Amino acid sequence: ESHFPPSVTPSTCCYCGTGCGVLIDSRDGRITDVRGDPEHPANQGRLCAKGATLHLTAAPGTLQANRALYPEVRTRRDQPRQRVSWEQAMAVAARRFAAVIAEHGPEAVAFYVSGQLLTEDYYVFNKLVKGFIGSNNIDTNSRLCMSSAASGYKLTLGVDAPPNCYEDIGLAQCLFITGANPAAAHPIVFRRIEDARAANPELKIIVADPRRSETAAIADLHLALKPGTDIALYNAMLHVLLAENLVDRDYIAAHTEGFAALEAIAADYSPAVAAQICGIPAEDIVQAARWFGLSKASLSLWCQGLNQSRHGSHNNAALIHLHLATGHIGRPGAGPFSLTGQPNAMGGREVGGMANLLSAHRDLGSAEHRAEVARFWGVPEVPAKPGLTAVQLFEAVGRGEVKALWIACTNPAHSLPDQARVRAALETAEFVVLQEAYGDTDTAAYADLLLPAASWGEKEGTVTNSERRISRVRAAVAAAGEARADWAIAVDFAHRLGDELGRGEEARRLFPYRRPEAIFNEHRDSTRGRDLDITGLSYGLLEQRGPQLWPFPEGAEAGLPRLYADGRFPTPSGRARFVPVQHQEVAEPTDVDQPISLLSGRLRDQWHGMSRTGTVPRLFHGAEEAVLAMHPCDLRHRGLEDGDLARVSNGRDSLVLRVAAVAGLKKGRAWLPMHWGSRFMHGAGVNAFTGPACDPISLQPELKHAPVQVEKA
Ligand code: SF4
């Protein structure tokens, strides 16, 4: 018998940064189906295979399989965790964190959160650490995702804001897709690219990717560059644009600064020189530059191929230079447009939920910004000392400096580089809290306290997608088991920690929230006058008018579809900046012992560590296991054939993997999907091999490349 009428709840897909709108069908308190929301501007009703199977991940059988349903705690590391009440669990958490803070100071605790949290969750965690605990030790897996894009935007354009919107894909005359494979990573963005191709026979598509990806397969020109040589390619394209008078000197003079220094550098990057560095034909570089420069509107799309590099910030800057030098920015169909990896890496940056940021795109390094945020929160100060960023944070845990660690909605025992050290660090920590919807992730094995978190379809809040569009996430059903919303867990912890520290009243004043809307409103108010001003938005407006682009200041009729149309940039001079950038090697080049460049990326039908997609059998149809793709000659040379097992190793680790012969990879390169970890195979997955080297500006690690040897198993 039905207790509840069937209902339809509009919400947002929880996977990639495309941010597709979904309609959740539910009945009797259970999610029964999901469809694309035809009213949502990001996807207009379309969904990829992951989004279209979301309801299957919420099925009752799935819930029993791997959802975290109850708080669990262990008192000794050699004992399994035992189910406890929320009351007991939160009391333990508060007592242990308070004890560490009292004995070792606030910097001995740290929080590692996620671009998959909702903006409201993120806001509370950030305020908890910087406004109450008194350190800046909160970082996020967005550090692994978009921090180089954020730095690249700030270096060149002044603020961390993707200037374009999805509509621009259909308006571009030249699409330069570089370090991205939207066919797999952003499938509904890729549908737009296919639509643009079908609608416009003149459209040129250039794809720069070391691998012939599914996206490269539809390109007019594929630049299969050597891993990590992006800057040489972009500088050489600039060289050609200059040589063939395809730069816009008027735009450069009116709206930019620093071009002369870069022009001098570009002179050294002839197509012949870059061809040597990048391992691609010089004429292809010339062709790419001509198409980019001659088109009426050129749009670049990029993702982790640029960001996950030890010189990711300069990769981003070098690409953005091409737009500034040609004036391909601030116009319909033209601009540099990063694709966000995770569903809410944007929202996390907006609330300042990273070790070097503060609310509303403020910088921790600015005394003025710290004072503004302290005033806004009603706290004496925000500490000046920068917090530990993702890789640094786990290194500090390993050294015993960070003793208590709170991890929310992410799986560092899968996703961070140099897994052996990360896992050793997790074992070293005195106390690890994991706030998670899934109880069997690789990280769950290290949790002393597991707090079950509400998941997609069960929680309320907002997210921001790649095009700066804020969408509501809505609950269709009650949370599974005893799971609670992430923001609510953080608020409860803040109150209890306050009690333990003798600051209970202060904690209740700072964290009075009973609903996510109150948190959104506070975040909104923090954006007044900032580049991402959303003072014109409210849950009510999002309810009435649907998802909206930022900025959306008070009094605005709509958000801005593209930034910098007036040629003014949010820098002190009002001009965009060219940065003198040079080619640099990858952190760990190949050598005779480790001659293969190991690359990694996403499959279309899986998401991250597969805690959710791994519960849907049909999503394995395209790939049942982690298979290492290599050139047929490289396999033959090692006595291997397609389908054989091979031992992959480097100085860090060794894994046995099945190999596949793929002619679309150049010799000396191998490619492995990032999704498989200890839960699905023996070993830590691709990050068994990656190193901890980080970009010096963004502190994003070089996850995209590691040298390995491959031998017959
Ligand atoms: Fe979800 Fe991304 Fe697929 Fe859209 S493209 S349905 S946001 S996974």
Image: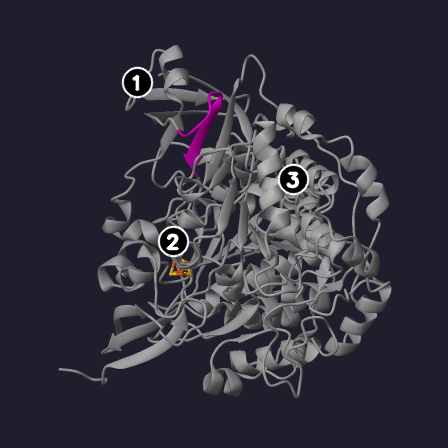
Q: Nearer the viewer, residue 210 or 144?
A: 210
The reply to whether residue 588 is visible in this rendering is no
Tell me how far mark 3 sits from mark 1, CA to CA.
40 Å
Name the residue: 34% across, 39% down.
680
The residue to which callout 3 is attached is 395
Helix, strand or loop under label 1: loop
Answer whether residue 668 is magenta in the image: yes
Q: Could you say where residue 18 lies in the image, as x and y percent from the top left?
A: 47, 61
- Horizontally, is 119 left or right of 266 in the view? left
Q: Amino acid at mark 1?
A: Glu
Quarter of the N terminus within the rendering: bottom left
| Residues shaded magenta | 664-673
Up/down of 175 relative to 550, above or below: above
Q: Residues within 10 Å of mark 2 (few under 14, many from 20)?
A: many
Residue pointed to by mark 1: 641
Percent x, y for residue 706?
55, 29
- Sort mark 3 into few (<14), some (14-19) or many (20+) by Cα contacts within 10 Å: many
Q: Which residue is mark 2?
A: 439
Q: Is residue 412 left or right of residue 62?
A: right
Q: Position of residue 578 (x, y in %)?
A: 78, 49
Residue 494, percent across and down? 61, 70
In depth, the one of 15 and 289 nearer the eye is 289
Q: CA distance from mark 2 to mark 3?
A: 25 Å
